[in-house]
Amino acid sequence: MHFTSQLFLFIFLPITIFLYCILPSKSWRSFFLLISSIIFYAWGEPLFVFLLCFLVILNWFLGIIIDRSIQKDNKKIAEQIKIIAVILNLLPLLILKLLTNRSLINISDYLTVGDLSSFTYPMGLSFFAFTSISYLIDVYRKEIRAENNLFDLSGFLLMFPKISQGPITKYKSVVSGIKKPVVNIDTIANGLRRFIAGLAKKVMVADYLGVVSSKVFSLDPNSLNPRIAWYGLIAFTLQIFLDFSAYTDMAIGLGCILGFDLPENFNFPYISKSITEFWRRWHMTLSNWFRSYLFIPLEISRRKAKRFRLETNIIFVFLATGLWHGIGQNFILWGLYYGVIIALEANFLGMWLKKINPIFQHAITLLLITFGWVFFRIEKIRSWAPFFRSLFGLNNDNIHTLRSLRILAYWPILIIGAILCLPIINIIPTKIQNNLWIRVLTDCLLIILLLVSIAIISSGNFRAFLYAEF
């Protein structure tokens, strides 16, 4: 089940909100959140829901063992259990990513492993695994106590607003909402505003940008002229941010309705003046996870290394970031691309960038980000060079035009998408709170956006979220 499906919008969501709000006690709400989350996940993944339920019980049990070992000052056993727990959470992730890797699927034609072409990666497993690992490590670090209530921990790990695409949430940041959810007219209204804004961003902007990018990237890169290549690349650059941030808006809105404060995942990354800043603003919960649970431990464990410790640790972390997105070669090289750039920024490149005009800092950063999406979007490495040649007008064949591809009329959507990437939209929430008339007008606009979005969804003109496959 997806947030943009008619089943979710017209049946699941209204019933869930209504029943959740009228339940008399916290314990009933906690149990209902768990049941509704299982139904939400099982609708799209009827097989893998059993795997997730098993892992929830396993993590609950291991968390209690780690906590008790720490309390008894038996840190060695706690550390061993922690390592086992991390492996057990990563193992299904690794196996299923390998089984859904296209290279392995092609190899399976020559081996006796059966047909893997119809096998799909289960929704949200990467986000679930990283959330579970953060919980267990935080218990080990004594930042939190293990949760004894299985329903509460299960509701946190399987919470339907974030199970599909995050944000990756620490237990201590939502435990108060789980124990004592605050649900009232204001939280419901604010949550609905955020949800509708995300829904409109997804179906009215990101999906139409996806039409452009899909048409361009489905063509032979040798047949593209610079205008089409840049048009498609810019469309994808905007699409991937707006698509993912739209999901985050919807997830945070749903969390607000249910009485939870889910963390922000984006902070206008395309206004960054360095790649380091970009990764502080892009997919922030994933970046913070790698920083807390991989980069800092690497820095501590390798503190005696005298040369290139910081640089190699950065590259290793971004290699892991690429692998998190997929085991395909393009994701691995995409991760290394950013790792090398940030390692250079940690040295001379960062100091050089700070000395030049901020406009050029931003332009260079945005160009590097845009080029990076080529590696992310195009799976076949042999197609990278022809596409870059097309960007700079070095291809001989120019058989397509924007008109022949029927994507010229989408340029207003690109402009709207670019505006949504700017922080000027942050002014709206403040204006809503301070001015009654602006609040009324904004709510009327949101109702119109909701109706238009529903019309688009009902017509079947919507696309799955891009990060659902990760």
Image (cartoon, rainbow, N blue to C red):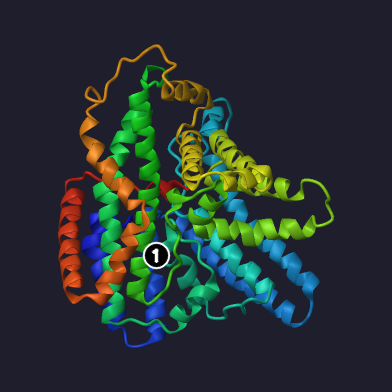
Above or below 292: residue 191: below
Above or below 446: residue 69: below
Please give left or right for residue 400 compared with residue 373 in the image: left
The quarter holding residue 343 reads: top right
Q: Going by the picture, which residue comes out furthest to the top?
A: 396
Above or below 379: residue 392: above
Residue at the (35%, 73%) spot, across then down: 256
Q: Where residue 5 sits in the image (x, y, percent)?
A: 27, 54
Q: Going by the picture, which residue comes out furthest to the bottom?
A: 24
Please give left or right for residue 227 compared with residue 64 in the image: left
Residue 38 in view of the camera = no
Label 1 neighbour load within 10 Å: few <14, some 14-19, many 20+: many
Q: Nearer the viewer, residue 300 or 351?
A: 351
Please give left or right for residue 164 compared with residue 297 in the image: left
Residue at the (23%, 22%) spot, across then down: 404
Q: Which residue is mark 1?
A: 160
Residue 410 in view of the camera = yes
Q: Where residue 386 sits in the image (x, y, percent)?
A: 47, 20
Q: How many marks?
A: 1
Q: Where residue 259 sits in the image (x, y, percent)?
A: 37, 77
Q: Nearer the viewer, residue 353 or 32?
A: 353
The quarter holding residue 90 reads: bottom right
Q: Where residue 188 sits in the image (x, y, percent)?
A: 28, 75
Quadrant in which the N terminus appears:
bottom left
Residue at the (72%, 50%) spot, across then down: 310
Identify the secondary structure beneath mark 1.
helix
Residue at the (20%, 66%) spot, across then down: 442
Tell me which amino acid carries mark 1: Phe
Q: Nearer the viewer, residue 41 or 209?
A: 209
